[in-house]
Image: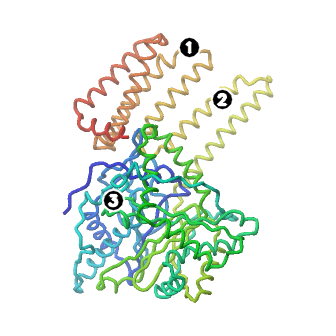
Amino acid sequence: MQSRGAYWRKLDNAAKLFSAASTKRDTRVFRFYCELREEIEEAKLQQALDRTLVKYPMFLSVMRKGLFWHYLEQSNLRPVVRKETREPCRNLYIRDKKELLFEVTYYKKRINFEVFHALTDGTGASEFIRELVKNYLFLVHEGDGLADLELNEKTVTVSDQEDDGFAKYYSRDNKGRKKNRRKAYQIRRNSDLGSLQVTEAEVKVADLAKKAKEYGVSMTVYLTAVLMCAIHGKMSRRQEEKPVALMVPVNLRKFFPTDSMLNFFSWLEVEHRFGQGKDSLNEVIREVKQYFDEGLTKEKMGERMSEYFALEVHPILRLAPLGLKNFCIGFGSRSSAKEITAIFSNMGIIRMPEDYAKYIERFGVFTSTPKVELCMCSFEENVYLGFTSRFDSSVIKKNFFCILEQEGIKVTLLETEYPEEATADSIGMKVFRIFTFLCIAAAVIALGSDYCVDGHFGLSLKICGGAFSMWLALAVAFFKRYNLLKNAMWQLAVVTTVCTVWDLLTGWHGWSVDFVFPVVSIVIIISMMIISKIYYRHPKQYMIYFVMAAGYGLLFPLVFILTGLVNVTAPSVISIAFSFLTLTALILFKGREFREEMEKTFHV
């Protein structure tokens, strides 16, 4: 059995983007699946998953938030295999909720492996599902003489799996010129369908390879050009003023050797401007090939990798608070999305031993995306294509398959069932919206009634303030419901701030700083003690919240006393003493955990 990896580790360069830019609509989750020739046995699949995680323990990590960066931390959580009941590529990274960043489900003959992109990339995910499927088939068919084979000849340690390729190969001297950015054609969303739309197809490797060879290009270049022409079929003459630009991810392991299971990829940006008399497939292929020939070099890939890593290690940018970083990264991600029309990802060949392959129908891959994305992988004699989008892209898909058919490549559409997403979260949001409406209605009725009675808004403004205070407290409780300690910390900040504002608006009597700040600080620390005793066992799960609450209850009352704002000093003195003793106890009795938590939280 391999030893576990690092207790905690920094995010790789690409993962920092995914953790900041993911949303409910753009989950940054992708799926590899394996369709077998037999029904799945849940108990055997659970055993196979447990065996797989012995080899790849780095997947047993949760995302945590530091002051400057997110980071991944080892977790005692263990995944439970379940029957698939929700739509593909749902949100796996839920802020404030400490959950694993992957899941394994099954449906009839299909094994699904979904993972948040901050944890690994396509290469790491394909290795995981290969091992998972191998373990499952061995457990089911051991009695039939199936041998427990090693899929990789080379032994890869956990340390190798957690190797950060971006940090390893970054060079300060290897930064190229930034290209001039220009907006690309954006596919109009005539109908937002909400749920992820998945369309899969199968073509023969031999047919595709033969046609690509006729053009003197790789299958990736050929399909990139076909997709661009399929998109062009949807464009109007006026829309041809902007180029069609595709993002094509590139596995950097082909240029920079590493056994890392973390993200280690870059991308090419390939574009063609239609409407200039060179719109045939042959001419588009020729231009795409030129982009690949010029861009797919170790030098070019190194330049792009170092360009983005340089932002991470910039002495000023790295010290920016995480909230500001997330805002800037999210804004930058949305801005750069305007330079891309669609995405094409070739996940490569998935190989399995011959004795195992006879039990497998196919592998497939697709991803959640705010755009149109085409993913591709191959297994045995077939290439499997997966289109995804959250809006109506049927014209593009139809054009793509028609072009392949016209080129003599037979396309077989695959019919796969995907259940609808569970509605628990939507029900909770509906209740919150009803409460929001009731608060607004109460404010409107109070203002209208007050004005009709005496033409003033004295009492009604207080009612509005009370309604807003109730709404704010519930909003914090609702959106921070996944982390009770963080919820308590937010309630501390909200209650003290709201009470201070009320004190100011009613003529400032000082009750907010005399009583509210110290009393609420003490109550919150005590409530945290109770919560941590009931729900949290390890100091790493509650340490930072105690430090924040104790610091809050110590510093603010101390400042109020020193500035003369406090009229009644006893509550503030008690709060200062109680908070100081809390911090002292943490340092004395949980010193090692305290230092580790501070190191993780403040790492830059």
- Identified by mark 1, the residue type is His
Q: Which mark is residue 377?
A: none
- Identified by mark 2, the residue type is Ile
Closer mark to the observer between disc 1 and disc 3: 3
Q: Residues within 10 Å of mark 1 (few under 14, many from 20)?
A: few
Q: Which residue is mark 1?
A: 509
- Kindly state the secondary structure of the residue where label 1 is placed: loop
Residue 51 spot, x, y in % from top left? 26, 67
- Kindly state the secondary structure of the residue where label 2 is placed: helix
Q: Residue at x 49, y 61 (%)?
A: 90
In this orientation, which residue lies closer to the viewer: 52 or 206? 206
> Disc 1 and disc 3: Cα gap in Å?
55 Å
Which quadrant holds residue 109? bottom left
Q: Which mark is residue 463?
A: 2
In this orientation, which residue lies closer to the viewer: 177 or 31? 177
Q: Quadrant of the N terminus?
A: bottom left
Residue 303 spot, x, y in % from top left? 45, 56
Residue 166 spot, x, y in % from top left? 38, 54
Q: Which residue is mark 3?
A: 59
Closer mark to the observer between disc 1 and disc 2: 1
Which quadrant holds residue 253? bottom left
- Identified by mark 3, the residue type is Phe
Q: Earlier in the sequence, mark 3 or mark 2?
A: 3
